[in-house]
Amino acid sequence: MSNLSFLIISCFLLLNVLETKADESNYLRVSLERDSYVLGEKVVIHVSTTRLLNETVELIPNYETPDQLMDCKSCLHKQLGPDQQSVDLIWYTLKPGSVIVYFTVKPLNSTSTPIDLVIKNAFFQISIGRSDIIYYISAICGWLYFLAWILSMYPQVVINFNKKSVVGLNFDYVAFSLVGYSAYAIYNSLFYYVESFKQEYYRLNPHSNIPVALNDVFFSIHGVLLTAITVVQCFIYERGNQRISNRGQSLLCVFLSPCAVSTFFLLKGSLPKLDYIYFLSYVKIILTIGKYIPQAVFNYQRKSTKGWSIENCILDLFGGVLSILQMLFLAINYDDVKFFTNNLAKLFVGAISCTFDIIFIIQHYFLYRHSDGDQEKGSNASLRLDIDQLESSSLKHSLSLDRINTISSLSKVLYERRKSFVHCICGNKILYEKQNVLSLNN
C-alpha cells in the first residue's frame, strides 16, 4: 500500500511540475453553437483572430474527412485582416456522419503556400445525425449508465458498514480496483488539467479533441475515494482469515513496478508524455477485466455470495448494457461504425463486466440461493441439539443428586436404627447379667 500511495502522490504532483503555457503562435479561434446537428440543418461557424493582424489574409477551409457539408460557396474568399477580425461561415448538412474542418490562411496578393495555423483552436468537428430523437435517446443512455456506475460503488460500502464485517468480499478484487481507479484518475487528470499533455496530444493529433471530459475525471476520482473507503473497512471490520492472495500480490507488483519506473523516467523527461498516460490506460483496462475473476472464484469456493453486494452487480450490469446501447444508437444515428472501432477498450471492458455481472447474478439467485439459509438452519438445529443435550445432562445430573441424597438419608436412618438396636441389645445383656449376679448372691 505504501508503494501505491507513493505512486499516486508522485503522479498527481505532475499537475504542477509539468504545467506549461499554451502555444502563443495560435491566433485563430473557431467557435460554434454545438457539435451535433441533423440533416438539412444550417451550421454557422464563427472564426475570429486572437490578436491584431498586420495584413489581410484569405481564410481557406480544409476537410480532413469526406465533405458532408453543403454550400461551400459561402465559405470561399472570406478574409481576415486589420479591419476584419472575425467572420461567419455557413454550411448546410447533407448526410449523416462526422466531419472535421480546419483552416489555413493565405496572404492576399501572394503566390506563397497557405500558412497552416492549426494548433489547437483553428478547427472544428461536428457530427451529423439522422434524427434528434435518436440523439436524445443516446444522451439519456449516456447519463443513465454514468449514474448507474456511480451508484454501483455504494452498496458494498453500506453492507460492510451495517454488518461491521467484510467477510465474503475478496481482497484481490478490492486491491485491483484501487490500483485500476488510481491509474484511471491519473490518466484523466493529466489529460484534462495539464496543458503540456494537451499540447502534446494536439501536436500529434492536430484536428482532434482530447478524449477526456470532466465527467470522466469525476468518475475516476470518485472510484478511488469509494474504493479507499472499502480498503479502510477491510482493516477495521471483521475479516476472518481473508487477505490479499500471493498471486494477487505478485500481479500488483507486476503492474506497480512499471508504473513507478515510467513515472521516474517521465519526471526526468526521458519518456514521452502520451506514452505514459496511454500506459496508465492499459493498466486500468487489464485490471478492470481481471479484478472480477478472484471474486467469482471466491464465491465458488465458499459456495456462497454472502457478504458480496448483488446490488453492485445489478447496477454495474445496467450501466454496462446502457453504455453499449449508447454506442449502438450513436453508430446508427451518425452512420459511423467508428463509435465501436474507436472505443474498443470501452466496448471490451463493458462486455467483460456485463459477463461477470451475469455470472454473479447466477451465483446469487440460482447456484447458491439456499446455501446461506441452509447453513443458518443447520447452525440453528445444531444449537437446538446442543441445548437439548445440555438439558438432558442437567436432568440426569439432578436425578443423580436426588438419588445420592436419598441414599444418604436412608444410610443415616439405618445407621441410627442399628445404633439404637446395638444399644438396646447391650442394655438388655447388662441387665440380664446384673439379674444373674443378684440371684447368685441370694
Image (cartoon, rainbow, N blue to C red):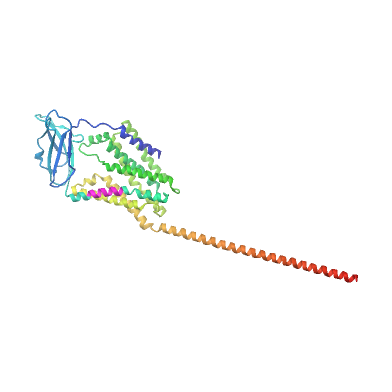
Magenta span: 138-149
Q: How many marks?
A: 0
Residue name at image x 27 percent, y 38 percent:
192
What is the x, y in percent for residue 436? 86, 70
Residue 437 lies left or right of residue 246; in this view the side is right
> Which residue is at the front of the view, 91 or 81?
81
Residue name at image x 61 percent, y 63 percent:
400
139 drawn magenta? yes
Residue 21 lies left or right of residue 4; in this view the side is left
Instruction: Single out the residue that lies furthest toward the top.
Output: 54
Image quadrant occupied by the N terminus: top left
Residue 19 lies left or right of residue 159; in this view the side is left
Q: Quadrant of residue 33?
A: top left
> Which residue is at the front of the view, 356 or 398?
398
What is the x, y in percent for residue 19? 28, 32
11 drawn magenta? no
Residue name at image x 27 percent, y 43 percent:
215
What is the x, y in percent for residue 100? 17, 40
> Which residue is at the front of the view, 120 or 426?
426
Q: Main secondary structure of the magenta part?
A: helix
Image quadrant occupied by the C terminus: bottom right
Residue name at image x 63 percent, y 65 percent:
403
What is the x, y in percent for residue 199? 24, 34
